[in-house]
């Protein structure tokens, strides 16, 4: 294994919250391959930068291999949502080298299209390689045609969020790594989707892993948590060998072969297991849990004792694996949730002006009697969700009696996550009313819709965007 380090801090902390970890007098360095910035190459900017600086890379094509040995935020000016003329491409110039090698902690890589090509050598070329680093953040990157898209070796406490990784040997690989969080990533068409090798206490949540030979592979992996991932159309959904004490629940397995477990792992929580496309049991009690366990490996005791029957998944198992796909709950779940204490005169326990943590739809319904409801759905382990907490508090204080700001933790309230069809967090929407048993949402363009997919606001957003939609919701009430 090659020895190289990397580290990152989220772009959102710099642009949205101004909370990047920087030193006094930190500089912003602009890179432009057309000559309009401080430098024309990313490596030149890195060489001249100091700890805490931010490097903004203008759209263009940068053919280079980059080594980072300082605490820097390296951000694309465009991000992955722009059209082809406004994207920032980094293509490896030396076939034997990785595209990004990071030798320092606290580094951010955000919004790049990264490709190195398959080297065909004993050394695996990596799109972004992190070794022995902590607290790095890789977000919104698009990695294709690398031997390994993202590699963590001996790395701890890093965050990989909303990356697209495809057409490689390994999409994302963790080796001897601990305490990392992988969330909202789309890993498609690799030999191995996500690999956990000799790695412990990592969290994989809300990732979409599709059309790989093996969706998730664990070798000598222990005490990792795999929660709310969607594994579609892989040859094998999850393959675990010499692995134990991994906790796996609330995932969707729809694959040619769903799983192989040669170790001793835990396949359900106290309240839910996983959805299995080949489960043949029934749910006579109608509680969403199958009446008989789903046996994975009876010899090793790998059994899902609470297999899910009614669970959200796309229902389209053919071609579309876009991260913008929504999952809709079945009608029985919708009706049961909407009818649960639908009309109530009880009030929320918290006062107006505070962010209200909710676990039931009745709390939303009660608040709607007083005005619009701003709904945030997230999780404590999600760094992007945590970064938005100050903005939520500001919104609650600002809008006071005019609107209610509520928050849902997907781990504490899986029913609500199912009802609202949440796949990527943080997730925001603004509810302005109920019509014929369905919530009505305010869209960013000022129109209303019963389709939450059209109205929801995903990802980390600045306060002004959220205020704008809240103001539109208040005007709608008049």
Image (spheres, grey):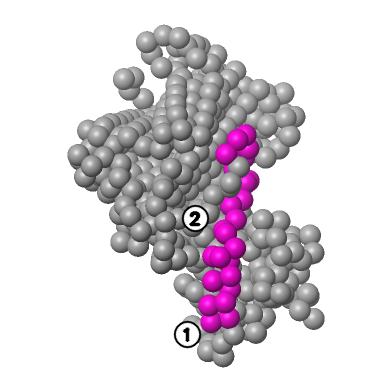
Q: Main secondary structure of the magenta part?
A: loop
Q: Quadrant of residue 273?
A: bottom left
Marker count (numbered): 2
Question: Up-down: is 464 above or below 67?
Answer: below
Q: For residue 202, which quarter of the picture?
A: top left
Name the N-terminal-most of marks 2 and 1: 2
> Label 1, on which residue?
349
Q: Is residue 122 left or right of residue 221?
A: right
* Residue beneath the point at 42% across and 56% down: 282
Within the image, what quadrant is residue 61 found in? top right
Q: Is residue 36 left or right of residue 398?
A: right
Q: Is residue 251 visible?
A: no
User: Is residue 124 depicted above or below 397 in this figure?
Assistant: above
Q: Is residue 355 located in the magenta-colored stretch of the structure?
A: no
Q: Which label was assigned to residue 311?
A: 2
Q: Is residue 338 magenta?
A: yes
Q: Is residue 288 above or below residue 204?
A: below
Q: Position of residue 39 (x, y in %)?
A: 62, 26
Q: Residues within 10 Å of mark 2 (few under 14, many from 20)?
A: many
Q: Pick out the residue farthest to the bottom.
A: 345
Which region of the structure is painted magenta?
Answer: 317-342
Where does the N terminus fall, quadrant-wise? Answer: top left
Measuring from the top left, give residue 445's x and y in whole percent. Answer: 79, 60
| Mark closer to the observer (2, 1) | 2
Residue visible at 51% across and 68% down in the picture: 407
Q: Which mark is residue 468?
A: none
Label 2: state its secondary structure.
loop
Residue 443 position, x and y percent, is 73, 62
């Amino acid at each position: 294994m090659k020895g190289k380090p990397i580290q990152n801090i989220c772009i959102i902390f710099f642009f949205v919250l101004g909370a990047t970890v920087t030193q006094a007098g930190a500089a912003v360095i602009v890179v432009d391959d057309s000559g309009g910035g401080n430098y024309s190459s990313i490596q030149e900017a890195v060489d001249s930068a100091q700890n805490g600086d931010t490097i903004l890379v203008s759209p263009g094509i940068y053919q280079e291999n980059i080594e980072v040995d300082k605490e820097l935020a390296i951000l694309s000016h465009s991000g992955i949502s722009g059209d082809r003329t406004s994207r920032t491409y980094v293509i490896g110039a030396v076939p034997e080298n990785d595209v990004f090698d990071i030798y320092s902690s606290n580094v951010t890589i955000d919004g790049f299209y990264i490709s190195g090509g398959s080297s065909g050598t004993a050394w695996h070329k990596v799109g972004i390689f992190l070794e022995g680093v902590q607290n790095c953040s890789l977000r919104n990157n698009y990695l294709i045609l690398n031997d390994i898209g993202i590699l963590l070796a001996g790395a701890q406490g890093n965050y990989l969020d909303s990356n697209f990784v495809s057409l490689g040997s390994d999409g994302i690989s963790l080796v001897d790594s601990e305490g990392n969080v992988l969330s909202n990533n789309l890993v498609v068409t690799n030999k191995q989707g996500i690999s956990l090798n000799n790695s412990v206490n990592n969290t994989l949540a809300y990732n979409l892993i599709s059309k790989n030979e093996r969706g998730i592979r664990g070798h000598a992996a222990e005490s990792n948590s795999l929660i709310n991932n969607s594994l579609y159309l892989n040859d094998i959904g999850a393959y675990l060998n010499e692995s134990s004490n991994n906790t796996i629940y609330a995932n969707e397995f729809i694959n040619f072969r769903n799983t192989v477990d040669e170790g001793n792992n835990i396949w359900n929580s106290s309240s839910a297991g996983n959805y299995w496309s080949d489960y043949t049991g029934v749910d006579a009690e109608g509680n969403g849990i199958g009446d008989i366990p789903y046996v994975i490996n009876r010899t090793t005791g790998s059994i899902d004792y609470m297999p899910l029957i009614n669970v959200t998944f796309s229902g389209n198992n053919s071609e579309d694996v876009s991260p913008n796909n929504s999952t809709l709950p079945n009608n029985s779940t919708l009706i049961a949730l909407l009818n649960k204490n639908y009309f109530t005169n009880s009030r929320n326990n918290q006062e107006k002006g505070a962010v209200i943590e909710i676990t039931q739809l009745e709390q939303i319904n009660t608040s709607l009697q007083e005005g619009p409801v701003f709904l945030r759905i997230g999780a404590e382990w999600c760094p992007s969700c945590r970064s938005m907490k100050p903005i939520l508090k500001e919104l609650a204080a600002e809008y006071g009696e005019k609107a209610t700001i509520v928050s849902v933790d997907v781990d504490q309230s899986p029913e609500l996550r199912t009802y609202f069809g949440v796949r990527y967090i943080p997730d925001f929407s603004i509810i302005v009313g109920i019509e014929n048993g369905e919530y009505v949402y305010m869209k960013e363009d000022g129109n209303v819709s019963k389709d939450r997919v059209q109205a929801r606001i995903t990802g980390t957003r600045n306060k002004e965007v959220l205020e704008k939609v809240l103001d539109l919701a208040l005007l709608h009430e008049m």
